[in-house]
Image (spheres, helix red, strand yellow):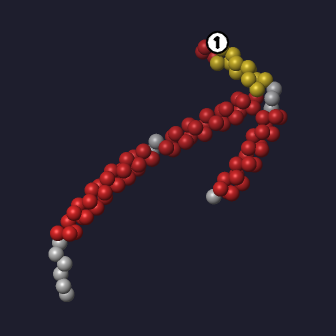
């Protein structure tokens, strides 16, 4: 798994570095309603937007999983409770001989 991670991460990092070096020219971002203009290198704008998109996508895919996690946690508690009850009840059951 670690090798697969490195196999994906290293080329992607190299591509990002090459992209950043090739796109250092300044770009002006005008934030319209606020009369604010920010000048930043093009690679910061593109990679920053990509990063924000990844965060938003991860957040949106994580939200529906909350329901599953809550149900799993409740079932784990119920299983633990039933196992404790079983451990208490086992010694009181008499063994039958065939």
Residue 19 picture location, percent across and down: 79, 38
Residue 39 picture location, percent across and down: 73, 20
Q: Nearer the viewer, residue 32 or 18?
A: 18
What residue is at 65 percent from the left and 14 percent from the top?
A: 36
As drawn, the residue found furthest toward the bottom would be 98
| Residue 2 position (above or below residue 22) | below
* Mark 1 crowd level (few <14, some 14–19, many ≥20, 10 Å Cα): few
Q: Nearer the viewer, residue 12 or 95?
A: 95
What residue is at 77 percent from the left and 43 percent from the top?
A: 15
Image quadrant holding the N terminus, namely bottom right
Q: Quadrant of residue 76?
A: bottom left
Asked whether, in this view, residue 56 is left or right of residue 43, the answer is: left
Asked whether, in this view, residue 33 is left or right of residue 29, the answer is: left
Image quadrant holding the C terminus, namely bottom left
What residue is at 70 percent from the left and 21 percent from the top?
A: 29
Residue on which disc 1 sits: 35
Q: Quadrant of residue 17?
A: top right
Residue 41 picture location, percent across and down: 76, 26
Asked whether, in this view, residue 76 is left or right of residue 62, the answer is: left
């Amino acid at each position: 798994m670690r090798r697969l991670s490195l196999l994906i991460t290293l080329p992607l990092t190299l591509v990002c570095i090459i992209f950043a070096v090739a796109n250092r020219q300044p770009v002006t971002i005008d934030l319209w309603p606020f009369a604010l203009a920010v000048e930043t290198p093009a690679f910061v704008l593109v990679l920053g937007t990509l990063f924000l998109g990844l965060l938003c996508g991860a957040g949106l895919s994580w939200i529906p999983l909350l329901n599953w996690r809550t149900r799993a946690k409740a079932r784990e508690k119920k299983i633990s409770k039933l196992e404790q009850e079983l451990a208490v009840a086992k010694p009181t059951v008499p063994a039958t001989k065939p």
